[in-house]
Amino acid sequence: MSKMIVLGAGVMGSAFCFPPADGGQEVHLVGTPLDIEIMKELKRSRIHPKLKMELPKQVQFYDFEELGNIISDLPDLIVIGVSSAGVDWALELLGTLLKQPVPLLMLTKGLTVTEQGLSILPVYAAERLKQMGAGVFSVGAVGGPCIAGELAARRETRVTFGSPDAKQFPWLDAMFRSNYYHINFTTDLTGLELCAAMKNFYALGVGVPSGQLAVAETAANAAQMHNPSAGLFTEAVREMGLLVDFMKGDQTNVYGLAGVGDLYVTCQAGRNSRMGRLLGEGMLYCEAKNEKMRDETVEGAELALAIGPHLERLFDNGTLDETQFPLTRAIIRSICYNQRMEIPWASF
Amino acid sequence: MSKMIVLGAGVMGSAFCFPPADGGQEVHLVGTPLDIEIMKELKRSRIHPKLKMELPKQVQFYDFEELGNIISDLPDLIVIGVSSAGVDWALELLGTLLKQPVPLLMLTKGLTVTEQGLSILPVYAAERLKQMGAGVFSVGAVGGPCIAGELAARRETRVTFGSPDAKQFPWLDAMFRSNYYHINFTTDLTGLELCAAMKNFYALGVGVPSGQLAVAETAANAAQMHNPSAGLFTEAVREMGLLVDFMKGDQTNVYGLAGVGDLYVTCQAGRNSRMGRLLGEGMLYCEAKNEKMRDETVEGAELALAIGPHLERLFDNGTLDETQFPLTRAIIRSICYNQRMEIPWASF
């Protein structure tokens, strides 16, 4: 039996407890300062108020103030399941409390721009912890099409675990595999994480035609707009592949669960698609965000704001060939510069 | 101005007339013996009874008995837009009437098993015409996510035209490109056609979870089954890629419009998805076909019946590694051997 800590009791962190807990592992779920109400309810009833599912008996609940105590008895693995915005907070806390390195696994998705350029979160996390003198951490990550509520309902789910260190795969597999949770492994953490983050960004584009349909004149035959969506889906896969190439990842993850698989599920439902739809209806990003999605985090838009200006610099100085990224540029213009969303069909 | 004949006035053949007709080309749409009612209505009102759209003025209508007359003034291109079942009829007719070779473009999708093994339709067509002494024909094809009714409504549509002869691309582009019809080109006809056919087959599998959801106990949190669908979508792309590899096509089309793009649109709607859903509900194929879809052509199932036994032989004699095709085999078992559909999650 392995002992693991999952930091972050939002829907994804909490859902991620199900496979290992069902497999008999000892799982400690630790709430962040944003999870206080959730933890109160979990401790009272074991039912997660957002997942609307009862957590398995193997899961024990803690507030972040208790992390020091449970971390002192060194866990086999620490899973970071906080929101993108909470990553620095989580690393700070771990850097302070951990007396020796423990393998980390990141559920949190995102990309950051550092002095070295675009960086995936596991690399960023390892560097931050090293800077804090906490030692050298092996940081892996999880990608693939996984809606938290479905995982918690034990729906068949396929994911890819990534780590630069293939020696970790057998014990990660033993710890997490279940009859409903099916894991592939990759050493290409760059490809995995880039796809996992960018699928939210590109879903903003793939969602546009459904919004255009809502405001377009109805066709004589009531035609929908599946052709345009599928055309954009394909372009998203292509441009995602070029970005992975630029970041020196390989293409396997682009065409696998973290790429086409997760993009597929993200385009079926969720907040990024919904924002894309609003942009397709003709709203400006700021308008749509403030009037329709004020209290919701639209990860793809947050990511565009975080990396869009950096990508634009790479286009401007010729590091990236702008003619190869028409969809990427259309999304950046719409989100970062609040321009009307225009799909450049003739450029594809 | 180019002159083209489109043989087959079903929804796809007729919709395919829109881009060249809008571009001012001279388009002759020729009905088959199955299109008699359609042609009557087109000649009367120009409105296609199934597309429910008025065809552009540039399109002229003919019955197949008139083909000899219009073919004698040699067209620049003949488009074959009949159903899979009508291909032999169409080739017979063209072989008899054509006095010299004309470039052909196939809209009809499918694969056949000949003495040489699995064959794509353009290759089969070229060979049949040669056998009939009609000369050497250049046969191209069209793939990509294109619902006919949407094309006829002039929705933005992206497709790939394939031909082994790249010299044809500029004039094909000039003939078909429009402000809503965006064409890429490939010389990899094998990859293009294999994807175009197999996407219907794999959509049967991707549709299964939505049927399972319909009959499963509702989860406490009302979870859907997007995770399983996306997991199967990814597996479909992987196995399609392996088949293309086996047939000596390259991977570009798998990850392009004819592969992921067309699979995406096929999984959103249509008869193949619907059959997959019925199988997911627990019906046997024959039951589902007879009771629920008796008068409908389910292309993916027709294809399974046409090539399934051949693929099984390739698995049995080790030409194809059966462990690499768990989804393909599950679909074949379900359609060709009328077994209950079981998704082999642990084999992925």
Image (cartoon, coloured by chain):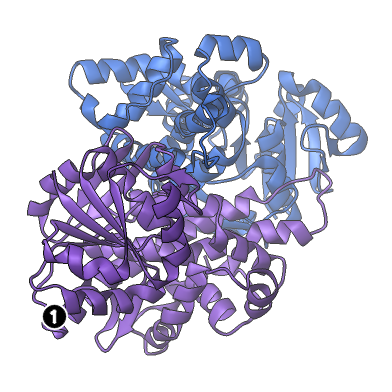
Chain colours: A blue, B purple
For the residue pair B96 and A59, the one nearer the viewer reads as B96
Tell me if mark 1 has few (under 14), some (14-19) or many (20+) residues whose alpha carbon lies within 10 angstroms of its own: some
For the residue pair A162 and A147, the one nearer the viewer reads as A147
Instruction: Establish if B9 lies above or below A241.
Output: below
Instruction: Establish if A31 lies above or below B141.
Output: above
Q: Is residue A52 left or right of residue B194?
A: right
Q: Residue furthest right?
A: A44
* Number of dots carrying numbers: 1
Give the residue at x 51% y 45%: A264
Image quadrant containing the N terminus of chain B = top left
**Badge 1 element:** helix
Give the residue at x 65% y 16%: A292
Q: Position of residue A60 (x, y in %)?
A: 80, 40
Q: Residue furthest front?
A: B44
Q: For the residue marked with disc 1, what is the amino acid?
A: Lys
Q: Position of residue B36 (x, y in %)?
A: 43, 66
Give the residue at x 34% y 56%: B254
For the residue pair B242 and A113, the one nearer the viewer reads as B242
Q: What is the chain identity of the residue bearing mark 1?
A: B
Residue carrying label 1: B130
Based on the displayed image, in which of its 4 quarters is residue B317 positioned?
Answer: bottom left
Based on the displayed image, in which of its 4 quarters is residue A228 positioned?
Answer: top left
Q: Position of residue A335 (x, y in %)?
A: 45, 16
Q: Is residue A73 left or right of residue A165?
A: right
Instruction: Establish if B92 lies above or below A335.
Output: below
